Each structure stands twice: as C-alpha cells, then as structure tokens.
Image (cartoon, grey):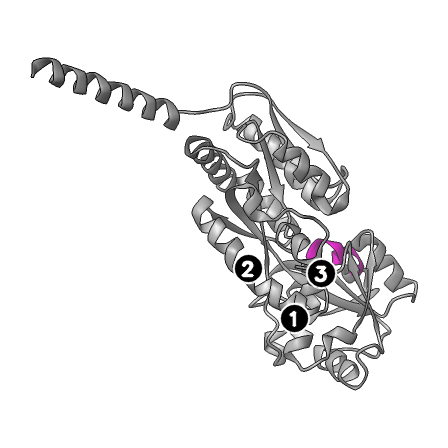
Amino acid sequence: MKKRVWACAILAALSASLAHAQSAWKPERNVEIISGTAAGGAVDRANRLVQKIWQERKIVDVTTAVVNRPGGGNTIAWNYLNQHAGDGHYVSIAPYTLLTNKIVGTSPLTWSDFSTLALLFNEYIVVAVRNDSPIKTADDLVQRLKKDPAALSIAVASTLGNHIHIGVAKPLKAAGVDIRKLKVVAFKSSGDSVTALLGGHIDVVSATTPNVIAQLQAGTIRVIAISSAQRIPGALAGVPTWREQGIGGTFLASQGAIGPRGLNAAQVAFWESAFQKLAQSDDWKKELAANYWDGNFRGSKEAAKYYADQAAELKVLLTELGLAKQ
C-alpha cells in the first residue's frame, strides 16, 4: 500500500513538473515575424513596430526578425509559416484576407489552418471621389448606381473580394444597389488607386484610412463615407459614416496574429501574452492613432470565434458578389 502511495506521489510530482514546464514555455532562439507584403506597406510597418516594441521592452528575450514573403495574396507567407508546424518561433500579423482568400479561391488556406493567437486592431474603409466630382454624398453615389450599377468605376486594392471591396459593396447592397453589376477594378495598391482617381481614370476609390489622408488634407479628394459605427477623430472627423447618412454599411476588418498550425497551449499562451503587452504600450497606441486604427486586443479563443463568425458572414456576401468559389 505504501509503495502504491509513493508511486502516485511521484507520478503527481512529475505531472506537476511537466505542466509547469509547458506553462513556462518561451522562445529559445530567433523568432521570425512573417510579413506577407513587401517592405514599406502599412501591415509591414506594423510588423516592424511589433519587433521594435518587443525588443525594447524585453517582452521577447530572444532576437526577432521581420521576414518578408510577399506574393499570392499572402499565400506565400502562409505556406512558409505552416512549413514550421508546431514551432513557436514563427508568428505573423494576419490581414483580413485570411478570411476571404479561400472563399474567393485565391488560396486553399484559411484562418482554421493556423494557430490563432490574438486580434490586434480594427481597420475601417472609406469611399472617396475627386473634389470636382458631382458625387458629394453617399446618397448621390447610391442613386447613381441604383439607376446603373456599372455607371461608375470603383477602384479597390489589391484583389477583388477583399475587405476593401467588401467595405464598399456591403453598404451599397444595403442601399439596394445590384452589387453583382458593379464595375470594380483591382489595383496593386491603394496608392495606385488614389493616383488613378486623381488622374480621372477611376470615378470612385474604396481604401483603408491611411491611404486618403494626404489627398484629403490637400483638398484634391472628397471622402464621402466611412464604414465605422461613429465618426473617428482627427483628419477624418468631418467624414460622415454610412449609418448617419441613412445607409446600413457599418463594417470593420479586424487584423490579428497567427502562428503555424499545431502550436501547443503553452506556446499560444506565451504569444497571447506578448501581444497583449504590445497592445498596452504607448508606442503601439500611437501607431494605431496615426493610421486611424482602433485597438481591439482579444485573446486566442475570442479571436477564433470572431474568425469563425466572420467567415460565415463573408461567404454569404461574397456569394452575392458572384466571387465565392467554395
């Protein structure tokens, strides 16, 4: 009997020791922060700020490096990430295309093919025209497109069916426009979209907030609507929401963080904590404000639920756009 008690005690001690070792996991070598775009873009800048804050605040004790793997609408970066299944030394900020790419057939990968770590911030979509355009309000745009959905060319970047496309299609659909017949043109970047607008080659631009600020302040474009639930401060404070113009078009794209598939609970917990500490830093909050992003930190489980709910909603909308391939 005593031997059995001792054996149970030893097993319990070993189990406790193992559990502690798992909960205490942390990186032991260089961590790669995988960026699915070329250097210089908004998401890439966010990746580099993540690296800077982690290093300066010693949130991550080992060295870190941003590794750019652009191409294929992030598919190249995601394939690279999953080549390191179960390895906690690889993380990535995941753009909204993590949800849309599989639905539209751009990539076979979606959010559930990775280890969900956190949500970080919300991004909003604005719709703009040239300052000399006869379209001055969201209602002007809606009435024109109700008469003829293909009457105006609408620029998005960088692929059809992404959050920038959805950010203009959703309110137009709510207003009664036949969104299947819209004339939507995809550009390589929102910078290219705005340039085409200024040159008179495009009638309307849908873009994320950082891409219109300079031209709005210069007075060369008019931003007629934003997809946020209420107006946002700063340079865009004068831009009305779709909602306040009587159109149900509230939409936000939450950007998150993922790791390769197969990370264990201890690895996920470490990175969830690291991203939470990042979200609480002043430098990160300044970056969010500069890009007109809203901080939206959520842990792994909440992030997974968000992705699952969004994927179901997006499949319906992208089917209505005629873009769903699933």
x and y, in percent, of residue 58 in the image: 51, 25
Callout 2 secondary element: helix
| 275 versus 27 height, above or below | below
Q: Quadrant of residue 204?
A: bottom right
Residue indicated by mark 3: 161
| Kind of residue indicated by mark 3 | Gly
Q: Earlier in the sequence, mark 2 or mark 1?
A: 1
| 92 versus 326 height, above or below | above
Residue 48 makes an appearance in the image: no
Say which residue appears at 53% left-offset and 30% top-offset.
86
Q: Earlier in the sequence, mark 3 or mark 2?
A: 3
Residue indicated by mark 1: 170
x and y, in percent, of residue 166 in the image: 68, 64
| Kind of residue indicated by mark 1 | Lys
Callout 3 secondary element: loop
Mark in the foreground, 3 or 1: 3
Q: Residues within 10 Å of mark 2 (few under 14, many from 20)?
A: some
